[in-house]
Amino acid sequence: MGFLLSVVFLNLLMNINYPAGAHDSLSLLNISPEVLILLSLISTAALLGVRFSRLYYVPLTIFVVFLRLFLIGEALIPMDFFRSFNLLLDSQFLPDLIHLLYTTFTFKEFLIFAVITVVLLIGITTGVWISFKTIHSYLSEIR
């Protein structure tokens, strides 16, 4: 059951269409190509008898979180700025965006949103890590 929940969590994380005006709930049922690649990497590691190690899964977890943030940026930039997403250009505007949010919200609102953002980022990262560990453990046991 844990294996199935882990795969569903990763699939939902990659398939969620945020931020979009209209959410197509059927698209959440599609199997994400990213998740298939991740499952093939984890199953190969389990098949080769590689133990679950931070050396392998920390970069993989960082990659998944970065990919999800990249997909969000790829949806937000054309919606708000009417141009395509450019990682090099847009990452330079991040301090300006944080300053804009700081000056437009009250300090209390800004602090609440900052804490929520950090908690969500930690929660998603932890969820990805636990999913990887659960999937690897299950595949190692059935090997």
Image (spheres, rainbow, N blue to C red):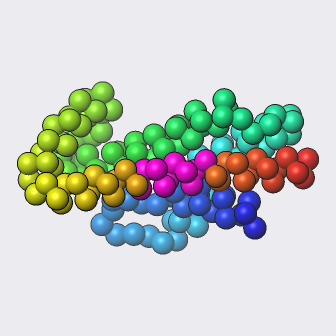
Range drawn in magenta: 120-129
Left or right position of 117 against 106: right
Q: Main secondary structure of the magenta part?
A: helix
Residue extending farthest to the bottom is 25
Where residue 125 sits: x, y (%)? 51, 48
Give left or right: position of 49 versus 91: right
Q: Is residue 71 visible?
A: no
Q: Residue at x 20, y 35 (%)?
A: 95
Answer with left or right where residue 98 lies relative to residue 123. Answer: left
Out of 22 and 40, give the one closest to the viewer.
Answer: 40
In the rendered image, the vertical position of residue 67 relative to residue 20, given as above or below: above
Most foreground residue, 109 or 65: 109
Residue at x 30% of width, y 39% of height? 85
Q: Residue at x 23, y 29 (%)?
A: 92
Q: Nearer the viewer, residue 123 or 63?
A: 123
Say whether residue 22 is visible: yes
Which of the image's four quarters has the N terminus? Answer: bottom right
Across and down, in percent, residue 73 comes to 33, 45
In the rendered image, residue 3 lying in the magenta stretch gets the answer: no
In the picture, residue 7 is in which quadrant?
Answer: bottom right
Q: Is residue 96 above or below residue 36?
A: above
Vertical placement of residue 30 versus 62, above or below: below
Residue at 88%, 51% (x, y): give it.
Answer: 141
- Horizontal and vertical percent position of residue 80: 19, 51
